[in-house]
Each structure stands twice: as structure tokens, then as C-alpha cells.
Amino acid sequence: MGIIFRQSIKGTVVHWIGAVIGMITMLYIQPKFLKTEEIGLMKVLYESGLLICSFALLGTTSSTIRFFPYFKNSKNRDNGFFFYLLVLPTVGAIIFIPLVIFLKDVIIDFFAEKSALYVEYFNWVIPLILFLIYWVTFETYSNVKMRIAVPKLIREIGVRILLLAIYTMYGLKLLTLTELVTCAITVYAISMIATFFYIRKFDSITLKHNRKFIDKPLRNKILKYIGFLFLATVSGNIINQLDIFMLASLKGLDTTGVYTILIYIAAMIDMPSRAITAISSPVAAESLKNDDFETANKLYRQVSLHQLISGSIIFMFIWINLDNIFAIIPNGESFAPGKWVVLFLGIAKIITMTLNFGGILIAYSRYYYWSLFFSVFIFGAGVAANLLLIPVLGMTGASLATLTACILSYSVQQWIVLKKIKGNPYTINTIKQITLILILVGINYLLPNWSNNPFIDSAYRSIIIGILTAVFLYKLKISVTINSIIDKSREKIKTFIKA
């Protein structure tokens, strides 16, 4: 866990720098300079490209991590792995981009009544799909090479700085809406190219390959895995973006724009999980290749606990300061009614962070075919919940549907993990962490309001709760790794003072 923790710390630093930039963009620049309809437009365009990209990848991300250990040898050569890595997304692009063009009228009809602006800019989705496909592919290659920092730098900081710049230019009337959309799509093209040049710098990538290396048994194993994974991806990725598309179709881009800002607030919760998952996944794949369930499950418990700790603490700080956040952001009164949206999405994020690695273990084990049944189940539950709740409760219904589908699906997934891999992420420290967060939230409600200034009130609450969090987290010995880091830091400070 040491290397994973260190790498995840580096990734998390990048995430948080990006988060500050993203916070400025999403919580100040966009609400100040863009109409909620325009915020909704940018969100739905991106999510449309991302959804089709996930299909066109044909399981590239998971299959790359799972089968990369098969290509490595004692001389650390990859046996033409980069060539094979490019084959899947290229085939996917050839299939799905023409399919989107063919189904354009059907897709447009779905949004025409409530989201006419999206229909006007729909054609921009096509190049966006292509840029996202190869950006994700190059990023995945970097991940399996255990080089996550620079790709994360590009994704979390580079992209956000560029988007911040173009939104500001739009607000200053230097860009029209069409030019704004054009520039935003171009940002993803730049990110794709930058990631490619980075992997060229640290690795002598080549399209040379040895066809004989992939023998018939390995080829059949890869194709079978990809087939099941693609079917699972179809269901899984649709449900991840179902709330956005259904809100845009049923309630319009205005509501979707408000929901987008609330999603971003909740999305800050899982920032550490992205780095931890990225660096842990190759380690899990290596263990499961050898059916080493003991090592994989030990990793599952450690990852799950640290995901819970980080996610729940971040959510706690967001929740205790949420009213102040709405008071600070421009036009905050438009977003304040969405407080329950943040609560439901936040709880869903914590559940996902805590248990998501179990799904990764299934995907990289010989039981990967269970992912298909899991995805079909979550898809059905998600569609039913959204159809039932969005017409009645609007964006609150969308968030509640997300939470409902999350609880049901991860309950089923954990049952599969327990049955097939004997994986159980829960320990006494899980209970300690949940109890600690509930107590700290309760203490926050006992704190008096010292000031009508939201900045002062947030600072005062955050300092008190932050100190209590650090003290109790250490005293309860919830994480051996965190306590060890604190102890080493204290020793260094003592040594420095004595010197």
C-alpha cells in the first residue's frame, strides 16, 4: 500500500490544484457569465461525447489494465502492446461515429421539445467523440506504465485552465456562443495531443508488433473478455449519465444547468479516489492474473477504507459549509433549492468510492462475466428510478434516483464479490469512520453563527471541525498508514526544533 499511497498523494495534489481552478470556473465564472441554459448546453454536449466515447473504446480501459501483465516479459518489453492498444478504439470509432450520424434524427427528437439549443449544436459532438477516444486511450497507456502524474496534470489542471480562459472570454463578450463551443471542443483536442507527446517522451512507443505473440488461447481470452465487457459498459455508462440526459429531455437545459453546478459540488468528494484507483488497478490486475485473491482482497480493504476516509471527510466539509457556498457563488439563490441534491449525490459518491474497487476486482478476475449481469441490473434500476422520480421531483428526483440505483447496485455487486472472490472491505475501522463523521456533523449544528459573512463563518466552522477530525482520526487509529505519516511528521518537526 505504500507506493499506492505515495502515488495517490501526488495525484491528489494535482486533483486539488485542479479543483481550485474548477471551483473558480464552476462556482463563479459559469454562474456569473453563462445563463443556466448555456451551462446545461456545455454539460450535455460533453456528456454526449463521453457516452459515445465509452462505447467506442470497446472496453479499452479495463482490458488494457487486465491484459498488460500478459505482454510484459523479463526484459520489460511490451511485445507490441501499444499497437494492440490502438486497435480497439480505432475499430470502435469506425463503428460508432457513423452510427451516431445515422441516428442523428432519432437523438434530436429526444431533446427537441425542451432542449432546442442542444439540437442546434449537436454536430459538435462528432469531433468531440474522436478526441475523447484517443485521449482516454493514451491516458490509459500511461496509467499501466505507472505514470499518472502528468496525464492527471493535463486533465485536472491543463483542461480547466483553458476552459476557465474561454468562459472568461465569453463573459467579456470576446466570443460568441458558437465560438465558445468551438473553443471548448478544441481544448479536448489539445489534451489528446499533449498526452500523446508525453507518453512518447517517457516510452519509445512503436506500432511494431509480433503477431505470433498473441496465440490462439490468449486471443480468445482477450476477445471473450472484451465482448462481455462491452455489453456491461453499454449498460453501466448509460446509467452514469442517465440523469443528465433525462433532465435535459424532460425538464430542459435550464434545470440541467442548475443540476450541473450541484453535480460539481458533489463531484469534489471523489477527487482522491481517482488517483488511488488509477494506481491501484494495475496492482490488482497483477494479483488476479495469478488468482492471488488474498493479496487482492487485502488491497480491497485498504483502498476501501482510505476511500471512505477521504470521501466522507470532504463531504462533511462541503455539507457544513453548503449554505455559505450558495451565499458566495453568483446567482446562488438559483442553486440553493438544490441542497438535497448535493446530499443525495454526496452519499452516492461515498458509497461508490467505498465499494467501487470491488467491481474492479470482478472485472480483472476470471469472474469478469458477472459484470454484465451487474450492469444490466443497475441499468434497469436506474431507468425505472429516473422515470418515476424526475417528472415528480425534478432535479431532486434525479439525484434520489441516482442514490437509489447506487444502493441497489452496489449491494448486488458486493454480494458477487463476497461469493466469488471472498472479498469483504468492511472492518471495525469502517464503523469508526462512519460514526466519527456523524458525530462531527452533529457538533457542527451545535456551533453558533458567529457572523453573517459566509467567508468568516466557513473559516471558523472548518477550523474547529478540522482540528477535531485530525485529533479523533489519530486517536481512534482508524488508518495505520495515516497514523504512521503523522508520527513521522511529528518526529521530523521535533528533530527540526531541537536542531
Image (cartoon, rainbow, N blue to C red):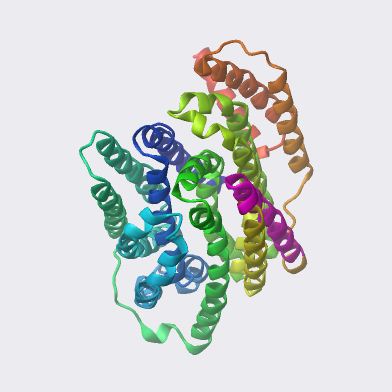
- Residue nearest the observer in this picture, 462 or 109: 109
Q: Which stretch appears magenta?
A: 391-418
- Could you tell me which residue is drawn at 55 percent across and 32 percent down? 336
For the question of whether residue 78 can be seen, the reply is: no
Work out whether residue 241 can be spotted: yes
Q: Position of residue 45 (x, y in %)?
A: 39, 56
Relative to 496, does residue 133 appear above or below in the rendering?
below
Left or right of residue 207: residue 218: right
| Residue at far bottom of view | 216
Residue 318, position in %: x, y? 58, 32
Q: In the image as oriented, which residue stretches furthest toward the left?
A: 174
**The quarter of the displayed image where residue 316 is located:** top right
Compared across the picture, whether 196 is left or right of 36 comes to left
Q: Is residue 229 above or below residue 19?
A: below
42 vs 163, nearest the viewer: 42
Whether 398 is among the magenta residues is yes
**Looking at this view, is 257 or 138 the one in front?**
257
Q: Residue at x 63, y 59 (%)?
A: 387
Q: Between residue 106 and residue 428, name the one nearer to us.
A: 106
Residue that extends furthest to the top in the rendered view of this protein: 450
Q: Is residue 58 above or below residue 159?
A: below
Residue 334 shown in magenta: no
Decide: is 48 above or below 99: above
Residue 278 position in % (x across, y down): 50, 54
**Magenta segment main secondary structure:** helix
